[in-house]
Image (spheres, rainbow, N blue to C red):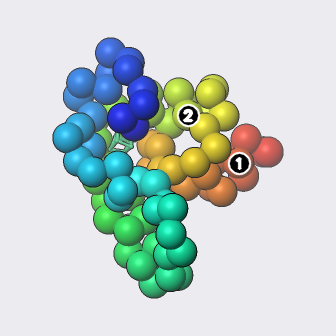
Amino acid sequence: MALLRAEWSDAAACRGIENLLFFSPDVLESKEVRSRRERQAKQLCADCPVREDCLSTALAQRESYGIWGGLTEIERRALLRR
Ligand code: SF4
């Protein structure tokens, strides 16, 4: 999110929140820790007023990493394959 500078990002629920919640760290992350982090991020996304804008931007830009619009990179790739 922090790399994005779009008009809708001003209303993002994640504005001002650590990117670490939305992106995997550079160090190894256990399955449990990753699962908890992704769950917390997705909870924020679920109530975000710009969720659709965020997701459509990530899909259009083929964002390779992170949670955007409530979906992980794997979930977004699956969505694009449909
Ligand atoms: S949908 Fe999630 S990642 Fe996208 S702007 Fe909202 S809170 Fe941030």
| Label 1 crowd (10 A; few <14 / some 14-19 / many >=20) | some
Which quadrant: the N terminus?
top left
Left or right of 3? Residue 82 is right
Q: Quadrant of residue 56?
A: top right
- Secondary structure found at label 2: helix
The reply to whether the residue tagged 1 has its Cβ within 8 angstroms of ligand 1 is no
The image shows residue 70 at horizontal and vertical percentages of 44, 50
Q: Residue at x 54, y 74 (%)?
A: 28
Circle 2 sits on which residue? 58
Viewer-closest of 38 and 82 = 38
The reply to whether the residue tagged 2 has its Cβ within 8 angstroms of ligand 1 is yes
- Secondary structure found at label 1: helix
Q: Could you tell which of marks 1 and 2 lies nearer the N-terminus?
A: 2
Image vertical order of residue 18 relative to residue 39, above or below:
above
Residue most extreme to the front = 27
Question: Which label sits on residue 77?
Answer: 1
| Label 2 crowd (10 A; few <14 / some 14-19 / many >=20) | many
Left or right of 22? Residue 56 is right
Which quadrant: the C terminus?
top right
The kind of residue tagged 1 is: Arg
Q: Residue at x 38, y 20 (%)?
A: 5
Residue most extreme to the top = 7
